[in-house]
Amino acid sequence: MTPAPRVAALIPAAGSGTRLGLGPKAFVEVAGASLLARSVAALAPHVDEVVVALPAGWTLPPGVPARVVVGGPTRQNSVRLLLEATQAEVVLVHDAARPFLPAEVVRAVLSAAQDLGAATAALPVADTLVRAGPDQAGAGQRWGEPTPREGLWAVQTPQGFRHGVLREAHARAQDDGYVATDDAGLVARLGEPVALVPGDARLFKVTAPGDLALATALAAVWDAG
Ligand code: C5P
């Protein structure tokens, strides 16, 4: 019998890419390689298997070393389906939309997840933060309440978990009808510890059209090095 994989990378890539407006975002190319292919290439050397969630009807391009499951209607559904598709003891969940993933971040998140049970890449917030006030009759956003940035981190992916910890977190979220934009938040709400591991500015999420220009500029340096 083939032994179960010890570490799996799970890549939710089933989003429709509405904000980018170019079809499913994971398949958008930057300097000749899709966001998905770049994410898979960054993770594959560190794990025993890679599983990706794709929109229904989509397939992986040839040469991308991963298994495929069909994703769900939300990111959280897609991750749950990915979790059900692997027996790995430790999983690394990474958004396809973050294609520039340094190896040292993968290693650090994996190591912290194995030690503590759950970990995420994250960066201390550098900008001044403010909550916008109410929109006054369509006049645009106005400065509302400033929010001290001390102690605040912006959460990225990858996020690493012992399989059982994340499975339990997803089951509880589903029972409670709780929806989050990431997985570490689901684990934290169970009272379990989550390590914050320094991420990287290059790990930004390609979301809006302007991010593509940034990604193209970065790809020139990334691909050369
Ligand atoms: O929309 P957003 O950029 O926050 O999505 C984060 C990641 O979750 C993307 O890689 C996207 O493809 C994935 N996703 C998914 N299934 C969905 C919605 C988003 O796998 N239903």
Image: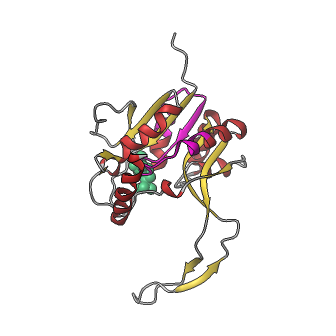
Q: Name the residue furthest top.
A: 1
Give the percent coordinates (x, y) of residue 95: 46, 48
- Residue 151, visible in the rendered structure: yes
142 up-or-down from 129: above or below: below
Residue 133 placement: quadrant = bottom right
In depth, the one of 13 and 219 nearer the eye is: 219
Residue bounds of the magenta highlight? 80-107
Viewer-closest of 58 and 84: 58
Q: Residue at x 57, y 84 (%)?
A: 144
Instruction: Left or right? Give the position of 139 relative to 30.
Output: right
- x, y percentage for residue 46? 53, 33
Q: Can residue 73 be seen in this snapshot?
A: no
Residue 84: in magenta span: yes
- Colour setup of the view: secondary structure
Residue at image location 60% in from the left, 69% down from the top: 126
Above or below, 36 relative to 162: below
Total marks shown come to 0
Magenta segment includes 201:
no
- The residue at the point 31 percent across, 35 percent down is 60
Measured along the vertical axis of the image, is residue 6 above or below residue 224?
Answer: above
Residue farthest along the front direction in this orientation: 224
Q: On the rendered structure, is 194 left or right of 95?
A: right
**x and y percent of residue 97 in the render?**
41, 51
Query: Residue 70: x and y, percent?
Result: 37, 37
Q: Which of the 4 image quarters holds residue 119?
A: top right
